[in-house]
Image (cartoon, rainbow, N blue to C red):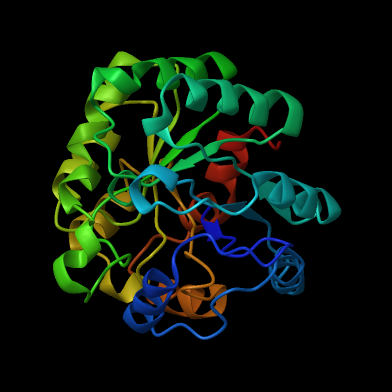
């Protein structure tokens, strides 16, 4: 449910170089900017499918994002393994709504990715409600980064990136006010895991993807609830290329999870959420 395309077919990078360098050091990642076709090759070799996206943070970063059109074209070339999500910059107001409708209607994206800290916005602010209303109308899920940030980690002031925008409690307002919008909270939401667990338990339209952390570091409360009340709400994700599927699955195999909940987490929950059945 969580794969980044960090460079488009024209060689344009998704973020400024200093953020790439800092995140690579934070995650100790190897192949940092694989092409869309390389990503497809990796996932095809593993007999997996993946949701793939970029992040449009042009206002906050002063950097034009890589091409969603290029991403969608690459996913179409590899539609046996890649599922494209779109991204718009919420801070562009009406333009974000217009672009989201275009990405859904003309390009055929299957959902949208947002990173409130990187994009520099509070998702519960009513000024962004027209965008959530549009996504609810389109019937497409919204995937939001939550919790700790690898982006800007170790840089002075975290490069100005504010963690509070990734508090999952801000998404509780969104999920409550737009009950027809599927909200996915990306990552274990450290240091707010209890809040994320509560929201996902309380609201039928909220899910959690398990990307961005090796499962051996998952908070105990997340593992425990994934075994019961959240077993249908948690979704396999890696944050590739920052974490490889093989490394993630190796650690996942050691978690104290019931055998009967593993297929849902690894496949069936996402199949249902994305309407792939």
Count all numbered tags in the image, as a single digit. 0
Image quadrant assignment for residue 27: bottom left
Image quadrant assignment for residue 172: top left
Q: State the residue at coordinates (64%, 73%).
A: 34
| Image side of residue 119 versus residue 142, left or right | left
Residue 20 % position (x, y)? 43, 73
Above or below residue 187? Residue 27 is below
Q: State the residue at coordinates (25%, 71%).
A: 153
| Image side of residue 78 versus residue 218, left or right | right
Residue situated in front as seen by the camera: 228 or 61: 61
Residue 135 % position (x, y)? 50, 22
Above or below residue 57? Residue 174 is above
| Image side of residue 36 versus residue 261, left or right | right
Residue 235 % position (x, y)? 46, 50
Residue situated in front as seen by the camera: 159 or 205: 159
Q: State the residue at coordinates (28%, 59%).
A: 223
Residue situated in front as seen by the camera: 233 or 88: 88
Above or below residue 36? Residue 41 is below
| Image side of residue 172 versus residue 249, left or right | left
Q: Residue furthest right?
A: 77
Where the C terminus falls, by quadrant?
Answer: top right
Residue 190 % position (x, y)? 19, 58
Q: Residue furthest front?
A: 62
Residue situated in front as seen by the camera: 156 or 116: 156
Q: State the residue at coordinates (60%, 54%).
A: 66
């Amino acid at each position: 449910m969580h794969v980044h395309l960090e460079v488009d077919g024209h060689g344009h990078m998704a973020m400024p170089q200093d953020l790439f360098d800092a995140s690579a050091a934070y995650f100790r990642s190897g192949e940092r900017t694989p092409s869309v076709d390389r990503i497809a090759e990796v996932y095809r070799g593993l007999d997996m499918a993946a949701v793939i996206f970029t992040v449009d943070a042009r206002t906050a970063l002063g950097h034009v994002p890589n091409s969603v059109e290029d991403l969608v074209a690459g996913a179409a070339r590899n539609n046996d393994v890649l599922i494209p999500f779109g991204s718009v910059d919420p801070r562009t107001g009406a333009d974000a709504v217009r672009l989201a409708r275009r990405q859904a209607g003309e390009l055929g994206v299957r959902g949208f990715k947002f990173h409130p800290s990187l994009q520099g916005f509070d998702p519960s602010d009513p000024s962004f409600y027209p965008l959530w209303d549009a996504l609810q109308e389109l019937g497409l899920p919204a995937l939001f980064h939550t919790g700790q940030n690898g982006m800007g980690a170790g840089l002075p002031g975290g490069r100005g990136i504010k963690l509070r925008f990734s508090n999952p409690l801000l998404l509780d307002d969104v999920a409550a006010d737009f009950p027809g919008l599927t909200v996915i909270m990306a990552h274990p939401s450290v240091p707010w895991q209890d809040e994320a667990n509560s929201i996902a338990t309380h609201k039928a339209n909220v899910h959690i993807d398990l990307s961005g952390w090796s499962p051996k570091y998952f908070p105990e409360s997340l593992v425990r609830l994934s075994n019961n009340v959240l077993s249908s709400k948690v979704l396999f994700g890696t944050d590739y290329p920052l974490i490889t599927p093989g490394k993630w699955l190796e650690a996942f195999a050691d978690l104290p999870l019931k055998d009967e909940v593993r297929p849902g987490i690894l496949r069936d929950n996402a199949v249902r959420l994305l309407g792939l059945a």
